[in-house]
Image (cartoon, rainbow, N blue to C red):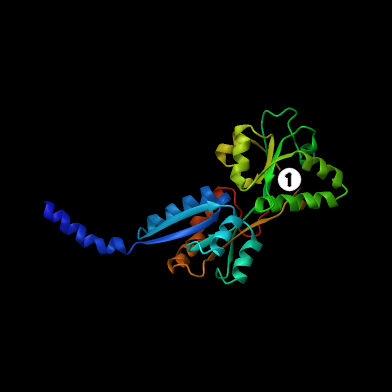
């Protein structure tokens, strides 16, 4: 029996050695949805192992620029991806998904905020993303639009900015501070208020005219393995898109 097992291992070794490992760099806001998609893909392609690495898009882009081994990049920011394309570090990108910003607040906050104007209330503790990450850039773009609109105005925006007590390097950190009760409100992606978090936090819609449409481009890293193309094709399949939609992402132009 022992000799049989040794022979079986020897027979299987060539097939095991042929297994491909794909390193996927992805924006942290994709964590739940992309994990589920990767599991579905590996069920169909057991010969390929997907290694997911989540962080802020800017941090991941910097790692690619510095030569970190990767095969695929999914960003939450179009200009970041365009920079890598221009420098020849990734191939031509395709737009995979869209997202929107939303205001998340503590449900026991009194009085309960009902609109973005309430973020200007004295003493409110607000968390946003820092300038280096997409969630922070999108938030500042929205605030700039509100400042230019007489309906809201620069005074309101200044008061909102005065309430910012935390600037995080990824959106998941904003959510964590909210769940820990360290801040009263935070501007996050709407996909961050999944079924579990939506029971713990209250979601408030932001002004549609100034709520940036967040694009998620995907591209194969120039030095990436050929099998990365197959995984990209799988991301665009209807079954994968249904997973992303269930997580709150939008396909196509979106609302």
Question: Observer-nearest residue: 206 or 187?
Answer: 187
* Left or right of residue 225, residue 107 in this image: right
Question: In percent of the image, x 58 and y 38: which residue is there?
Answer: 197
Q: Is residue 123 left or right of residue 71?
A: right
> How far across and down, in percent of the image, does residue 247 sit?
56, 47
Position of residue 17 relative to residue 108, above or below, is below
Mark 1 crowdedness (10 Å alpha carbons): few <14, some 14-19, many ≥20: some
Name the spot of residue 147 as percent of width and height, x first: 83, 49
Q: Position of residue 146 (x, y in %)?
A: 81, 49
Q: Residue at x 53, y 52 (%)?
A: 54
Q: How many marks?
A: 1
Residue 63: name its quadrant: bottom right
Q: Please, is residue 171 above or below residue 88 in the view? A: above
Residue 226 on image: x %, y %: 44, 69
Q: Secondary structure at mark 1?
A: loop
Foreground pick, 218 / 204: 218
Residue drawn at (64%, 33%), measured in percent from left and top? 182
Q: Is residue 57 left or right of residue 110?
A: left
The residue positioned 73% from the left and 31% from the top of the image is: 112
| Residue at the front extreme of this rendering | 66
- Kindly tell me whether residue 35 is visible in this rendering: yes
Residue 243 in sight here: no
Question: Circle 1 sits on which residue?
Answer: 206
Q: In front: 167, or 154?
A: 167
């Amino acid at each position: 029996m022992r000799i049989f097992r040794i022979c079986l291992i020897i027979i299987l070794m060539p097939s095991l050695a042929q297994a491909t490992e794909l390193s996927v760099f992805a924006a942290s806001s994709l964590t739940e949805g992309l994990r589920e998609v990767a599991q579905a893909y590996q069920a169909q392609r057991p010969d390929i192992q997907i290694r997911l690495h989540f962080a802020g898009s800017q941090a991941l882009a910097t790692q690619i620029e510095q030569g970190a081994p990767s095969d695929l990049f999914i960003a939450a920011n179009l200009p970041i991806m365009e920079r890598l394309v221009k420098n020849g570090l990734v191939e031509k990108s395709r737009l995979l998904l869209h997202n929107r910003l939303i205001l998340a607040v503590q449900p026991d906050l009194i009085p309960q905020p009902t609109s973005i104007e309430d973020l200007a209330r004295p003493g409110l503790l607000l968390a946003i993303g820092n300038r280096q990450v997409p969630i922070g850039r999108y938030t500042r773009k929205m605030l700039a639009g509100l400042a230019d609109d007489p309906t809201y105005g620069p005074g309101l925006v200044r008061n909102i900015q005065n309430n910012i007590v935390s600037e995080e390097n990824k959106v998941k950190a904003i959510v964590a501070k909210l769940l820990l009760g360290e801040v009263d409100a935070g501007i996050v992606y709407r996909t961050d208020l999944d079924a579990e978090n939506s029971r713990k936090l209250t979601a408030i819609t932001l002004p549609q005219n100034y709520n940036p449409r967040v694009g998620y481009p995907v591209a194969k890293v120039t030095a990436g393995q050929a099998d990365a193309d197959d995984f990209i094709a799988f991301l665009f399949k209807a079954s994968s898109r249904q997973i992303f939609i269930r997580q709150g992402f939008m396909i196509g132009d979106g609302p």
